[in-house]
Image: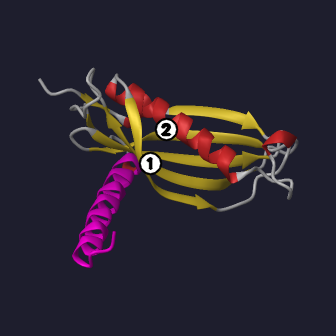
Amino acid sequence: MEITKTPKDSAVETRHIVMPDHANHYGTLFGGILMSWIDLIAVMVAQRHCGREAVTASVDKLNFLEPISVGDHVILKASANYTGRSSMEIGVQVSKENPYTGKTVRATTAYLTFVALDENKKPCPIPKLLPETDMEKRRFQNAILRQESNRELLKKIKEKGIP
């Protein structure tokens, strides 16, 4: 029997407050700090989906849309968008929230690929993803397009002999 999971089965949400030691010289959240928070929440989703060790294979897209300031609350929501045989795309949406007004704005989006590993640290099969809602189905289809685009780009790079 093939195991399937829905995106909500492994979804994770967390939040942080931006402290002065998280900020750059402009008083906004340092991109590297945010990237580490994104990777941490994404690996939690990957581990929950596959039920085993998972490692970051690539950060496929990272868009900084709005600066996040000291004192802002940072809300990270992540879920599996797509699964292959041993790999999975995890989508992360980052919002900033003004703690005094409650106003929330999308600040960053990211797509990461993780690979599940067996006891010998080799890629291994994972449960298939079964999107249920219209949004989950849209994310699944968009992830397929990103995968195809990435494969085409790699093919073109190899054809041109670019290292």
Q: Is residue 6 magenta?
A: no
In the image, which residues are magenta?
135-163
- Within-10-Å neighbours for mark 1: few <14, some 14–19, many 20+: many
Residue closer to the observer: 83 or 102: 83
Identify the residue under disc 1. Answer: 112
Q: Is residue 160 above or below residue 98?
A: below
Q: Secondary structure at mark 2?
A: helix
Magenta span: predominant SS is helix
Task: Let me know if residue 9 appears in the view.
Answer: no
Residue at left 51%, top 40%?
78
Whether 161 is among the magenta residues is: yes
- Residue 151's image quarter? bottom left
Which amino acid, mark 2?
Ala
CB under 8 Å between callouts 2 and 1?
Answer: yes
Q: Nearer the viewer, residue 32 or 79?
A: 32
Label drawn at residue 42: 2
User: Earlier along the polypeptide chain: callout 2 or callout 1?
Assistant: 2
Placement of the N terminus among the 4 image quadrants = top left
Q: Distance between the Cα atoms at labels 2 and 1?
A: 7 Å
Q: Residue 30: x percent and y percent?
A: 74, 51
In screen coordinates, is 108 left or right of 79? right
**Mark 1: secondary structure:** strand
